[in-house]
Amino acid sequence: MPDTAPGPVPGTGPSGGPGPAGLDAFIAGLPKAELHVHHVGSASPRIVAELAARHPDSAVPADPAALADFFTFRDFAHFIQVYLSVVDLIRDAEDVRLLTFEVARDMARQNIRYAELTVTPFSSTRRGIHEQAFMEAIEDARKAAESELGVTLRWCFDIPGEAGLESAEQTAHLALDLRPEGLVSFGLGGPEIGVPRPQFKPYFDRARAAGLHSVPHAGETTGPETIWDALRDLGAERIGHGTSAVRDPRLLEHLAEHRVPLEVCPTSNIATRAVATLDEHPMKEMVAAGVLVTVNSDDPPMFGTDLNTEYAVAARLLGLDHTGVAALARNAVEASFLDAAGKRALAAEIDAYAAAYTAAGPGARTAS
């Protein structure tokens, strides 16, 4: 969003209502970047079922139809429990490679050109996958995704906060001593309650000194002070979720002034009960405050969503037409850690797509 005082988002309809007919089709074809999406959490029901069948001792059902009930979360703690049971399905390098490439295939179907995939290597290496084999598997999948699918993947290695400082030390080792070519950032996920951000400062200091960007989760299930901690102690350059930022006007002003993007995941916030209903989602307040907002899917199959759906949700919440949706897509490019040439190319592709849609006129859009 523009670095200005609060005002309407480009492309916002005067009534704040839904965009023109054909907006879903526009979103489906729109070239996109995604910045907050988890590796294991992106496993499709088909892949989860396949892995569950390979590992019958798992608590995860092998029947794809049963996965819908399995992925119905009571609260955030239950979500973490379910998530970790899926993590347990990734037991060897072949599982890692298969999962990673299939995630990229699903992204390609949505016209996602670039994604920063949050990977939690500690969860796999502590289950017995050799650390070098893990790195080779994700890198092999990354290169294949780019050459075969046209999807550019980069990695964020994140600390599973619930596993404590041991996981932080191991994640720092994996990120810095075995640093894969695609690694661009260092994160912190898992529950926020009972997992204060400041304790992870030494690990983020090391990662930042090595040139990795800082992208911790903060303010999803806790208050604004967690976001302040992420900014002050972890040097956060983007904030994962940040839904509670709207409770602190001074924090919103800081985020807007310093162009610290928020990685907003609307459907995820409802599924984990971080926000009660979509109509209560604080995205509109974030945008009105001038904060750079990006739209993301988090753990899409687990939440019954995908990035296209999240853009449609955002369009409704913000009252956007196709011009506003394209502006959101450019936000993600701006907030990404893609190199300057890559940013220019992807932004130009978004602009060209939006211009062609505008030039086609209402009749052609409806027909499509």
Image: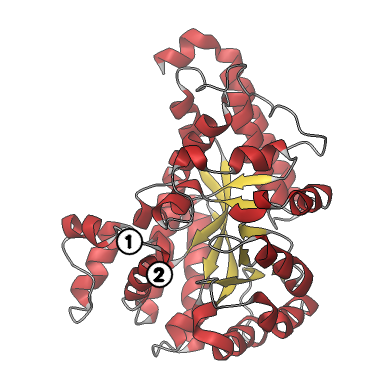
Q: Is residue 325 left or right of residue 252?
A: left
Identified at 69% across, 55% down, the residue is: 338
360 above or below 210? above
**Around disc 1, counting alpha carbons within 10 Å, would you say few (fewer than 14), some (14 to 19), or many (20 or more)?**
few
Residue 185 coordinates in the image, percent (x, y) = 66, 69
Q: Tell me the quarter of the image containing the N terminus.
A: top right
Residue denoted by label 1: 74
Mark 2 to mark 1 CA distance (whole Å): 8 Å
Q: Is residue 187 left or right of residue 213?
A: left
Asked if the residue under mark 1 is in contact with the one under mark 2, i.e. CB atoms within 8 Å, the reply is yes
| Snapshot quadrant of residue 53 | bottom left
Viewer-proximal residue among 326 and 293: 293
Viewer-proximal residue among 156 and 267: 267
123 above or below 39? below
Q: The residue under label 1 is which amino acid type?
A: Arg
Identified at 74% across, 62% down, the residue is: 237
Residue denoted by label 2: 77
| Snapshot quadrant of residue 351 | top right
Q: Which mark is residue 340?
A: none
Identified at 66% across, 51% down, the residue is: 247
Residue 333 coordinates in the image, percent (x, y) = 67, 46
Viewer-proximal residue among 245 and 352: 245
Residue 308 visible in the current orientation: no
Q: Tell me the quarter of the image containing the C terminus.
A: top left
Residue 148 coordinates in the image, percent (x, y) = 47, 54
Q: The residue under label 2 is which amino acid type?
A: Ala
Question: Judging from the image, what secondary structure is the residue with disc 1 in?
Answer: loop
Q: Is residue 107 left or right of residue 117?
A: left
